[in-house]
Amino acid sequence: MISSKIENSIIKYISRSATSEDLDILTEWIKTPSNKQIFKDYVKAHYMITYSINDPNPDTIIAQLHKEIKKQKRTSYTSKLKSFYKYAAILILFFGLGYFYQKIFVKTKPDHILVTKVKDITLQLGDGTITTISDIGEGKITDATGNVLGEQNGSKLIYIDKALSQELSYHTIKVPYGKRFSIILSDQTQVFLNSGSSIKYPVPFIKGKNREVFLNGEAFFDVAEDKTHPFIVNANELDIKVLGTKFNVTNYPEDDQTEVVLVEGSVHLNIEGNYSETKKGMVLKPGYKGTFDKTEKTISDTKVNTEIYTSWKTGNIIFRNAPFENIIKKLERHYNVTIINNNNKLDHETFNANIGIDEESIEDVLYYFNKVYQIHYKIENNKIIIN
């Protein structure tokens, strides 16, 4: 049995109308395994019903529901079955009203379709050779003499866990807009790269030296601990120094700020490589975001919900009270599109949204903003124009 407050928060989350308070409540609530299963049941029912809504025959919803209930009878106790009935009934009511409203009163989505040409992921080796990478490919990574350094497995590069070297050699991987990629470095540190990002890293790391990598764009780091070789992320004017921890760094050249969100462990933020304990440095605690102002050359910290800043690596982007101009930037990167906003009043207005970038097209997102927030747009010369 769950409270009506939790129930409302779940439904608001699924319908993409959750506030930051709703998100915080759910984040804490699903830490309990039994609550997490309840949440999954809601999502399962929602997915089933949403899938059925794509069929013009409303009876499909009922057919899919009965099919799922039969499965529940074979695998679950009566109490769980009752719960599923309840979740499905609530969601049918909630989404069914929207379905019939859309079918009867709302025009269908526009026929204009954006044609995006996504560039290839590239890997530059130590000798300067540049190769393209398919995010569904497989193969070995070798140096100029044929020595195997690692392998590719789909959207991930995995380097061999080998002894530290005395020879410095760098690889650089660049991920274009519209794609994501991940790397396991030779020290077994995991790096998840977001759209429009690049990272330069030693292969392997040098014995007796800091493990230093260079980032442009956004990445999530899960750093392997090595007390004798601190890990440093060089984000242009800001250095992030750690021993072993999990954190997200956003450092796009066009942004006015560099952001570091700490999930676990601790990091030391330093301006221009200054590692002394001065006013230029800051130790960040878990659950906090450190912000480096590129103009003022200052660092500040704020307590945040880390999930909002890290969900992109699992294919979701969350906006909570986000300025529209920031939303546009992220949509351009994730979907590899150009958005021109002619309505300047929107720039600093804030919005909430949850977007599954692997399941929802940019047209779906635009449709959502149009119907929920009455933001009008058109597609012209393969660009999105907001008026």
Image (cartoon, rainbow, N blue to C red):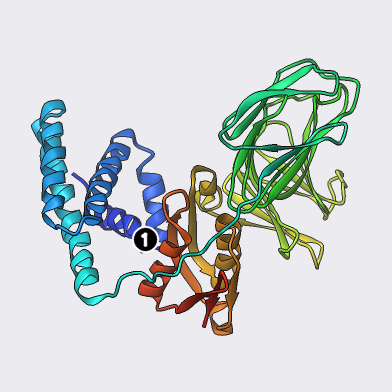
Q: In which quarter of the image is the N terminus?
A: top left
Q: In this view, does 102 lie above or below 287?
A: below
**In the image: residue 248, left or right of residue 207:** left
Is 256 left, or right, of 91 in this rendering? Answer: right
Q: In percent of the image, x 48 and y 63: which residue is there?
A: 320
Q: Is residue 231 above or below residue 301?
A: above
Q: Position of residue 205 (x, y in %)?
A: 81, 26
Vertical order, 252 against 100 (above or below) = above
Check disc 1 and report its element: helix, strand or loop.
loop
The residue drawn where x is 85% and y is 18% is 145
The crowding category of the residue bearing disc 1, from other C-alpha atoms within 10 Å (few below 14, some 14 to 19, many at least 20), is some
Residue marked by disc 1: 16
Coordinates of residue 376 in the picture (x, y in percent): 45, 79
Of 39 and 269, nearer the camera is: 39
Residue drawn at the location 49% of the way across and 46% of the way down: 315
Left or right: residue 243 compared with residue 35: right
Examine the rendering and report whether any part of residue 164 can be seen: yes
Q: Is residue 98 left or right of residue 150?
A: left
Pinpoint residue 42: horizontal percent, then vertical percent: 25, 46
- Type of the residue with mark 1: Arg
For this rendering, which residue is in front, 178 or 193? Answer: 178
